[in-house]
Image (spheres, helix red, strand yellow):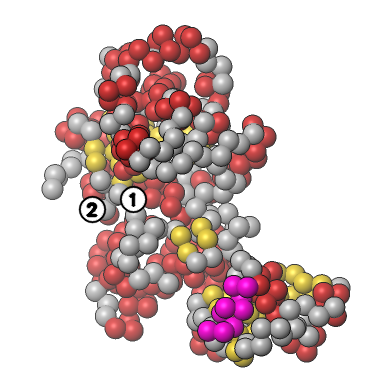
Amino acid sequence: MSEFKSDFLSTLQSRGYIKQTTHEAELDAYCSKNVPTAYTGYDATADSLHVGHLVSIMMLRRLQQAGGKPIVLIGGGTTKIGDPTDKEKSRPILTEEQINQNAEGIKSAFEKFLTFGDGPTDAVMLNNADWLDGLGYIEFLRDVGKLFTINTMVKQDTVARRLKNEQPYTFLEFNYTLLQAYDFLELSRRANCGMQLGGSDQWGNIVAGADLIHKMDGKQAYGITCPLITTASGAKMGKTVGGAVWLNAEKKSPYEYWQFWRNTEDADVGRFLRLFTDIPLEDISRLESLEGAEINDAKIALADAATEMLHGKQAATDARESAAKVFEQGASGDALPTFDISKTDIESGLLVAAGFTIAMLTKSNGEARRHFKAGAAKVNGESVSDANAVLSASDFDDEGVLTLSIGKKRHARLKLQE
């Protein structure tokens, strides 16, 4: 293992962020002097980022903490093609209106992790539509396309796998590597950006960008990738039974976010504390060494720190206290995700199964009934067995609230509205 001199790379290495680097010694020297500048790109394919994006966001945070300048690049232009990397089929094509709406939705998350402004180490946010939308196709092919060989591009994992499996790989997608490389070139020219950060699935695209900068401008540029994070049991990071763990509060409540981290597998606690919190390494060593039931203290520390970083200290406190009420006292906590339901619906005989679907604990009434059959579904702590049971006004407390549960870890509330 290399011993880096720069604060940035030393921190990345000690906390487990580094998978691959280009030109290691030169990269370390670049990060040791002046203000190293790096970017990561995020296509606007949804109106929120999710936990799967969090490692790269935290890498930008580590850069700023070490005195570097982060650039957040919103892919307003590249989203029109869709990144094919590590995908078995083409992404759906979004309209420009959808892309712009999604871009607005994902911007807010970064302000929780980075300090934006006009200072030398303040983060900036740019949109590659500003230069990609105006590219002339013939000029782009002549100036940039001539520097890429098909021989190299077909060796990229995604391309090779699609071709081997005889799955379609469109010419549109084939252009994505060129456009991402061109982004790196533009940022090198516009913002003196010398590094690109990303997941290990982006290695080919990152190297292509560094090569393009060298060929066109004679400058050295660098890349760093982080591992694609999976849990100890092999699951993809950020995916749960209920879907993606979104960063925007309107898509995933602070309580649900806290609970996601609280449910971390024992074997992942130390690694996730290093990657997703600012807790000092010596404190993490103590927490991850806890055994038996005490490991839950480390999980709570992880949940508190991760939720506070994204949603604030009060939200983390509220979530922890609500969890204590639910799991220790059998009560409903105020921070539980809450869904409104009308008295008219109750008076018309709303199925209990439909209540679980409204509360997003199940995707369908049929799924809810399967949980009934397995004995995993509860209303106010009481198991539901009747597949055709209906909700009644008496199920709600004096404040018009009832609690629904699937197993021991997934809970939500329904609240009566006039």
As drawn, the label of residue 276 is: none
Report the magenta stretch's main SS.
helix
| Marks 2 and 1, the one that precedes in the sequence | 2
Give the vertical position of 37 relative to 138 (above or below): below
Picture quarter with the C terminus: bottom right
Is residue 96 in view?
yes
> What x and y, as percent, mark residue 176?
44, 28
Q: How many marks?
A: 2
Please report the bounds of the magenta region as a residue range: 366-374
> What x and y, as percent, mark residue 300?
42, 73
Q: Residue at x 51, y 27 (%)?
A: 128
| Amino acid type shown at disc 1 | Leu
Q: Residue at x 63, y 57 (%)?
A: 250
Q: Which residue is mark 2?
A: 14
Residue 8, image quadrant: top left
Q: Which residue is mark 1?
A: 228
Give the vertical position of 231 relative to 397 (above or below): above
